[in-house]
Amino acid sequence: MRRRDFLTAGAGLSALLTLPTAAMARSFASKLPAQITDLDATELSLAIRMKLLSSEEVMSAYLAHIHRYNPTYNAIVALRDSDLLLNEARAADQELARGIYRGWMHGMPHAVKDLEAVAGMPVTYGSPLFRDHLAVEDDPLPASIRRAGAIFIGKTNTPEFGLGSQTYNPVYGVTGSAWNPDLTAGGSSGGAAAGLGTHMLPVADGSDMMGSLRNPGAFNNVIGFRPSAGLLGSNDPFTRDLATGGPMGRNTRDTIRLLQTMLPELNGDAPEALWSAARRIGTGEPLELKGLRLGWLGDFDGYLPMEPGVLALCEASLTTLGDAGAIVDRVKPEFDMAELWQCWLTLRNSSRVGMLDWYEDPARRPLLKPELQWEIEQSYVLSAKDIEAAKATRSRWYIELQRLFETYDFLILPSAQVFPFDKTVHWPTSVNGQLMDTYHRWMEVVIPGSIPGIPVINVPAGFDDQLRPMGLQVMGPYGDDSRVLGFATAYEAVTDFLERRPVLVERPPTSR
């Protein structure tokens, strides 16, 4: 079944569900692809619920696919024993036979990012400090996924403590892009994105501080959604934590389904903006593109260095939106972007204060990656005045964005400043001839969405002549998550990037 046809032909999931059960089963079964792993998560869920496929069949197909390709891509780590997983799948089938249906992920395989704890499974954070650490209980995010019926098969790889958009660590090694396993999958949700892009996972969870859902989404031609700050966390819009969990999917519809699963119950102190955002997360009804006003930020009028080809590829996608009736304008914010970078450094480095004990322990410090040691060292020199100044900058940036959103429905940026690069390189030291003064300066394009905590989604922008994928960041006003997702659904309907599949490689990886 071609995803684009399913989205646009008017005979999608909602239409199927209006048919009598027998007719629905016949209609859906006729559209099933030859390979179980080619079903997207929503289709797979329906096939299991309608008993067109058993959970055991699904698990067998995924395990075979993983054992064949994961040695090359290294997306899934800490993979559990196959016999145990098949037993759990049979148990899910037996429950369904008795009329017990746990949720839309009933009997579906799932791997959790290795920054989250899952009871009885390793949680290493990619660090040798936790190489042998087993979790005793689920963190809230995996707990919600377990309640939806998923079977946890393992973890997805991540860089050490999630630092850097290059997924490598001394515990599990390096993860390759679904489109070329010799190139980086991005990060920190690199294992999740590569697992989706290679169809080793139906859907994936991740997290995002500095583009960790958006950058790997771009590097693997999948969807990555960073929700409004607080929607999946503290529910406090004033704290605006830099990091948040978020969903990833092979398409927008699946991404929305997982987001709905991840949503916590909001406490009584949650602001109306979050209550409203949570209520409006629906099925991702596509927005009408005609007449939408889109602000193209590009490289901030030459401020950001970009690898040649990135901007041209992104602008070609914007042309497609223009052809569909959207109005695209070049926009330059009235803001000192260098000041925004300094704001980011201060806020990010101040978050490392909790790691001082590791740094000050002579036995543990050598086990920390140099980039983390550097961030901890930077936290030592920060004053309360520095942090307050950064918060003031963040507030002014939020106000500037609100001014732009009075004119534009969405603001758009590239999802990365470079295409996927050699995975043996820890990080690009220069971009288009400009030296990078920190290990994460090459990711600066993502901070305009991270700092204010607004919803941002990565949608694919296509491929260069080397088949290296790239994406677009689409940013919306705080709490407007549903419209950002609706835009992504509409964008998906007028492009075919998500229908393209990489040619998977079955060989040992070149480096680990």
Image (cartoon, helix red, strand yellow):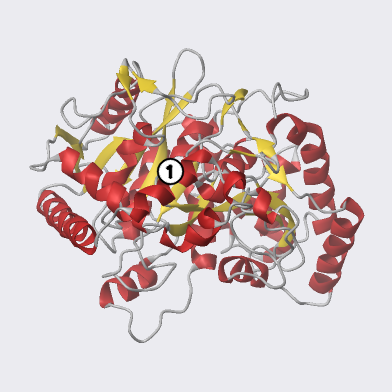
Q: Quadrant of the C terminus?
A: top right
Which amino acid, mark 1?
Trp
Where residue 449 appears, x then y in whole percent?
A: 29, 49
State the residue at coordinates (56%, 64%). 18
Quadrant for residue 303, please give it: top left
Q: Is residue 295 left or right of residue 418?
A: left
**Foreground residue, 257 or 430?**
430
Q: Quadrant of the N terminus?
A: top right
Where residue 395 appears, x then y in whole percent?
A: 16, 59
Where residue 170 appears, x then y in whole percent?
A: 67, 40
Where residue 394 appears, x then y in whole percent?
A: 20, 56
State the residue at coordinates (34%, 59%). 481
Above or below: residue 147 compared with residue 253: below
Please count the marks in the image: 1
Above or below: residue 511 compared with residue 345: above
Label 1 crowding class (10 Å Cα cut-off): few <14, some 14-19, many 20+?
some
Q: Is residue 1 visible?
A: no
Most extreme residue toward the front is: 362
Most extreme residue toward the top is: 465
Above or below: residue 364 compared with residue 49: above
**Foreground residue, 244 or 129?**
129
Describe the element under mark 1 as helix, strand or loop. Answer: helix
Most extreme residue toward the bottom is: 268
Above or below: residue 318 compared with residue 362: above
